[in-house]
Amino acid sequence: MTDTPQLEHGDGPDVSPVGETHSFPSDAELSRSLMATSSSGVLSTLGAEGYPYGSLVSHMVDNFGNPVILISDL
């Protein structure tokens, strides 16, 4: 380990997946499962000072599995 923090994502050591990767669910399948099992989440942006600003949002999936996010001007 180093004393300097890692500022870039994805620069970690190369690690091979464990198990048979052809049986893993795709990213789309994992996303659909997550959306189907929850009803709210947080959307975040960076504020002018560089700090995260999070907003609670409600979401659902329609009959075709497409995400629907409910947003208001409050």
Image (cartoon, rainbow, N blue to C red):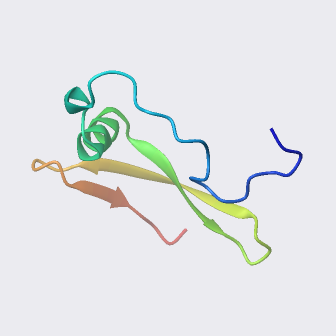
Question: Residue drawn at (80%, 74%), measured in percent from left and top?
Answer: 49
| Extreme residue toward the left, this view | 64
Query: Residue 32: horizontal and vertical position, in percent?
Result: 26, 42
Instruction: Specify the quadrant of the image occupied by residue 21.
Output: top left
Quarter of the picture containing the C terminus is bottom right
Drawn side of residue 9 relative to residue 17, left or right? right
Question: Residue drawn at (19%, 54%), measured in percent from left and top?
Answer: 66
Drawn side of residue 34 relative to residue 6, left or right? left
| Extreme residue toward the right, this view | 3
Give 73 or 9, whichever is nearer the viewer: 9
Up the image or down, 63 lies above or below 21; here it is below
Quarter of the picture containing the N terminus is top right
Question: Residue drawn at (74%, 78%), measured in percent from left and top?
Answer: 48
Query: Residue 17: horizontal and vertical position, in percent?
Result: 40, 30
Instruction: Specify the quadrant of the image occupied by residue 47.
Output: bottom right
Up the image or down, 35 lies above or below 47; here it is above
